[in-house]
Amino acid sequence: MGVINKKQALAYTGLDKKTFENYVIGQEFKCLPRKGNRGRFYFDEDELLNWLTTKAQRTVELDLEDYALCLDFALAQHFRHYVTSDFGTGRQREFGQKLTNWIKGQLGEVAVMKFFKEHFNFDVLLDFEIHNDIVPQDIIGVIENGQKRPPRIGIGIKSSKPKNVFLVLGENEISLPDRRSDVYILCRPDIPDDHILRITKNAIQIIVEEQPYYVSYRDKMPDFDNISCEVVGWCSYDELELKTEIPGQVFDGSRYVLPSGKLKRSPEEWRSLIDMI
């Protein structure tokens, strides 16, 4: 294997152009600029292969039962009238957006639990209780030798879209000790935008089957499929950097951030985290 150009790298990784460019910004893999060749960028094929291999190893499949657990939590949050707003603004989220964000966050936690179990035979307990106050720690227990014990450190699990390449935390999440975790894990659940349609497909079809346009989309309505979630990596809170902006986004105030490519993600680094927990 050798050096390939960007077009070849896109085909090799199977990523769309925007996601690929985001991953370069997030330092998921490096580009090798070649002078005197119209400014084209090149990539090490071995590095891309290693990235694809390790990404597949870190990706967990979440099934309908996992989704149902997270949906139940999200609905409970909604019906207790828990108010959320868009990050960095006072704009209130509508129902579908609230539900998606809650489900996405919980799917990330379930993915971490399954990742630890599948790859390291390490059992953790998640906090799926409904709390009135902000609870910064997402792992509340460890099963060791058949016995439950509390974790030795605080773990925060954060979820973002598959194209996002920065772990981003609000300033208060780090600057206020009672809201801070010792370690943060970033996940990228690939939850489809139409996930609600997929689980309500049969009910919707009954309602609209006599309507004039039903036949035009009847065979296009998707079924529920397992949701893949990449457990990207982890970092200590003191590795985060205080920024007012990242490429493509200016924050309303300051945020603590770290590019996804700088997160610890090798098997040895995951084992060192487990030893700390």
Image (cartoon, helix red, strand yellow):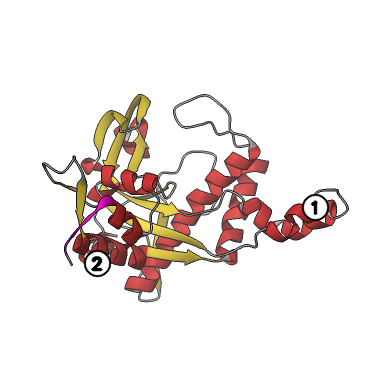
Q: Nearer the viewer, mark 2 or mark 1?
A: 1
User: Looking at numbered disc 1 in the image, what kind of residue is underneath it?
Assistant: Tyr
Q: Label 1: state its secondary structure.
A: helix
Crowding near pointer 1: few (<14 within 10 Å), some, many (20+)?
A: few
- Which quarter of the figure is the C terminus placed in? bottom left
State which quadrant residue 178 falls in.
top left
Residue under pointer 1: 214
Q: Position of residue 55 (x, y in %)?
A: 33, 62
Query: Of the numbered discs in the image, which one, if any, rests on residue 74?
Result: none
Q: Residue at x 58, y 29 (%)?
A: 92
Please provide the residue range marked out in magenta.
Answer: 2-6
Q: Is there any visible trace of residue 142 in the rendered image?
A: no
Q: Residue at x 47, y 66 (%)?
A: 61
Q: Residue at x 40, y 44 (%)?
A: 136
Q: Residue at x 38, y 59 (%)?
A: 14
Query: Of the numbered discs in the image, which one, if any, rests on residue 267?
Result: 2
